[in-house]
Every structure is written in structure tokens, then in C-alpha cells.
Amino acid sequence: MLSQLIVQNYALIENVNIQWNPGFTAITGETGSGKSILLGALGLVLGERADLSLAGEPGKKCVVEATFKTQISEVIDLLRDNDLDVEEDLILRREIVPGGRSRAFVNDSPVTLELLGAFGRALVDVHSQHEHLAIGSRNFLLPLLDGVSGNASLCRDFNIEFKEWKLELARLAELEDREARSKMDEDYLRFQLAELDALNLDKLDITGIEQELETLTNAEEIRKQLGLAHSALEREENGALDIIQQALGQLNKVTRYNDKLPLISERLEASRREIADIAEDIERFMQHLVFDTSRIQELTELSGTLFTLKQKHRLQEYTDLIAVRDEMRDKLEGLGSLESDIAALRARCTATKSRLEKIATQLSDSRKKAALTLAAEIREILAELRMVQAEIRFELSAEPELNEYGKDGVILAFRPTSSSPFKPIRKIASGGELSRVMIALKAAISAHRELPTLILDEVDTGVSGEVASRVGKLMKNMASRSQVIAITHLPQIAGQADTHYKVSKETLGDKSYTQVTSLSKEERIQEIASLISGTKTTPAALKQARELLEL
């Protein structure tokens, strides 16, 4: 049970320390006094997400601490599974420090918000006003049936397997995506490599290609100029060779007169031979120089391909294409297929799904039995609440895909009279009927679940008179099994509580503060009388309040 709640610097609450008793506790107060704020603070320490706008005075730490006295097995298992100390008191604490960072603690040990929430769900069942909206949802109904079925262990096994399966499916999708992208990369690499391999780069003289293309493209001009050069060297008269020959003849006539002249003659003869060789080379070049349009086209295409590839791979030099080709070959050799990993993981996914479906079938079978039991119990409770002919029915159906609860879908069907057809409860039940069905659900479930504390936030909406008295009696009966804390506006319910707290708002200067006060018997009489008669307490209301407290 919840034994203490400390709230500091949360919304309108500056500092509240509430000591809770076992049994049935009623909380009353005017609208806007802060009852919902108190519930919000409790939700914070039970693992709900923090609404930073509800933090109190800026610059100060917000702290909510709840102490529980409990030895239920689920809580002990959570403590041991997470290496936390098992002590007589279990203390949950939540802190929001300036700047918005949130911290959670269990018995002074830091924990994750998820783990704090797990403790909260094991310790407290909070029924808030908006839960009426969820009464027809799978997320609300299936856990109720599991509570009656005693499926806690089976649900835990399923959840572990289901989370693992989801992770496996995500991993499988990732591997398949990587494999698909790898195949695309491999195909593209092979295409690019084929482009480079087709050029036979190791044997390709790129400089020679450019030079040959330049030569062939300008063949006519080259032939013309070479012809002129050849003619200038080999003309019979006044050609370079003829003139040198004449000069040699003149030199040879006088070489005997000076020993240096033969050397000059030798040099001139060497020049003549060199020029003669040059003339022959020019003639041979001219003979081999053919204007070949097909060769020009071939070289032009090859040069264009080389230029395109150089640009494509963002290279400075044509010779760098060889390095790019070799790098591509290395990459292709390093590409490993993920097919074996994918096949193994796909097999694991199939095996995990098979186990999940088996557990889901067990859950479904036990829920169907629980649905009949729970519906019968709720029908009896509704009769006590003056809905004698009303019935509910849990309509279970198989979903096409596995979900976090197994493979069940569920509809809560309701009929207010035996002659009415069953319809989804959200479509047919009035506000008062919905409230009574909800309290009947909570009462029936409390007999099956090991839950220390049940908090009911205005679950009595839409009921009054004798029905309200019966709802109060039902809550008191529930409090014999669990601690029940009810936020209510009804005197018939507040009068049956073992303990009574009043929430009020006080204003000091320009600030308002929420206060929580434990009421004495006389104070309870005044408070219940005000619930009966409004702001002006009448003698009749006081008398009725005393009568209610004597119930």
C-alpha cells in the first residue's frame, strides 16, 4: 500500500507530505483546488512522462517521492531482476532539476523511467477520468482479462519473445536492404570496371594516341611542309646537300696546308651525312603518312572515351585511370554476400513467430474462459448498482497479425436490458452507465489481482442518490482487499471512507498554493455537509452528513 507521498515544487503544490492509511480513503475539494494536480504528481513518480510546464518555481528542483509498504511477488521480482535492494519500504522518487532534466530512483538507486513505470504499474492502478474513453480499447481490456486469467508469467514470456521478434524483423529488413544496396553497388562497380577493362589500359599509350591523332588530323599540312623541307635539303642546285658538297670540295683542296683544316672538313662531312639522314627520314615519314579517316575516327572515339572517364572519376591525369581500375577490382573482391546471414536470421524469425503464435493461442484460450467469468461477476456487481438487467460481453476475435498482446482483438459489448441487443459499450452506454460499468470492472478485477493500491478519480461521475451509496459501499468492500483512494464529489461515497482528505487552494499575495488536509470527524461532517448543500451549510445537511458517517 501507499504509505507516504511527498510533493515539492510541483505546479501549485509547494510542499505537501501526506501519510496514507490502509482501507478506503476519500479525497474531496472544490473544482480547481488541485485534486488533479495531486494525481498528476503521483503519476510522475509512477513513471509517466514529465510535463515540464507543471514544474513549480523556476530554478528550484521538483521532487515527488512515494513510499510503499508491500511484499507482493511482482515487485520483489522486479527488485531482484534489476539488482535492487529488497527492503521493508519501497521508495520511488522522481526529480526534475532546473533545465528540465528528469531523474528516477528506486530505493535511492538511479533507474530508467521505463523501470520506474514497471514498478508503478505493479503497485498502483490509477483510474483517471479519461480512462472512460479507453474502456473499449484492446490496450485496456486484454490486460484486464489477463489479470483474471493469471496470465502474468505467460504475458511476460510473450512480451520478451515479441520484442525480440520485432528486433529480429527490423534486423532482417536492414540486412535485406543492405544486400539489395550491395547488389546495386556490385552491379554498378562491375559496369564501371568493364568500361575501364575494355580499354586495356596497361597496354594503352595514351600520349601516343593523342600524338597520332594530332598527326593524322593535320596530315596534309604536315606533308606539304615536309615536302618543302625535303626539297630544300635535296635540290640538285642550291639544295642544302648540294651547297655543303660544294663547300667540302673547296675545303678539301686546301686541307694539306694546315693540319686544322682536315678537322673542319670532317665536321662538315658529318653534317652532310646527318642532313642526308634527315632528308631520308623526312622522305620515309612522308611515305608512311596516310590520311586515314577510319583511323582518325577510331582514335577520336578512344580519346573521347578516355576524356569522359577522366571527368567521370574526377581525375587530373589519364594515367590515374589505372589506379581507379585497380581500386574497383579490390572493392569487388571485398564485397561479401549477406545471403547466408539473411537466411539464418529469416529462419530465426520464423521460429520465434512460431513460438509466439503458440503462446498467443494459450493466451487466447485462457482469456476466453476469463471473459465468461469476469462478465458474470460484473453482471452481479451491476445488479447491486441498480442495473439489474444490464450485461456486458467480451467479444474476442483473431487479429490478422500478431500484436503486443498476442493475436486477440476484443470488443466490450453492452446491453442495458435483456431485450436490448449487445453493442460496443462506447456506442450505447450513457455516462452514468459507463461509470457504473467501470467501477464494476475495477471491483471485479481487484478480486483477482495482487494490486496494493487502487486510485479512482471521479469514477462516480453520472451517479447519484441510492446508486452513489451503493458505489461507496462497493469501494469500501474493495478496500478490504486493496488500499482504495477515491477522488469524489459525492457525499454518499466520501461518508463511507475510513480516511478523508480535503484539497484546497490558498492564496498568499499574488501566488496560489494547493494544500492537502487530513480531516477530523467534525471537519468531515462540515465537508460532507458542504458537498450536500453547497457553499451554505444547512442544519439539514449537517444532520445528513452525521447520518452518512454513521453508516
Image (spheres, rainbow, N blue to C red):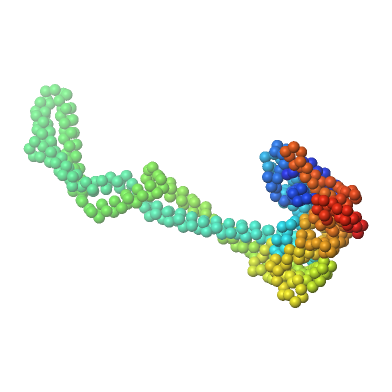
* Image point (80%, 53%), residue name: 534
* Image point (16%, 33%), residue name: 269
At which x and y percent is residue 468?
82, 61
* Image point (83%, 56%), residue name: 532
Q: Nearer the viewer, residue 77 or 294?
A: 77
From this view, report whether residue 166 is shown above or below residue 279: below
Q: Is residue 428 left or right of residue 16?
A: left
At which x and y percent is residue 322?
41, 47
Q: Nearer the viewer, residue 451 or 537?
A: 537
Residue 476 lies in quadrant: bottom right
Q: Is residue 493 visible?
A: yes
Residue 278 lies in quadrant: top left
Q: Is residue 150 visible?
A: no
**Outermost right residue:** 550
At which x and y percent is residue 497?
87, 55
Q: Is residue 534 left or right of residue 278?
A: right
Q: Is residue 15 left or right of residue 59?
A: right
Picture quarter with the C terminus:
bottom right
**Outermost top residue:** 258
* Image point (72%, 38%), residue name: 510
Q: Nearer the viewer, residue 435 or 154?
A: 435
At which x and y percent is residue 362?
75, 68
Q: Is residue 244 left or right of residue 432?
A: left
**Outermost bottom residue:** 419
From this view, report whether residue 167 is shown above or below residue 7: below
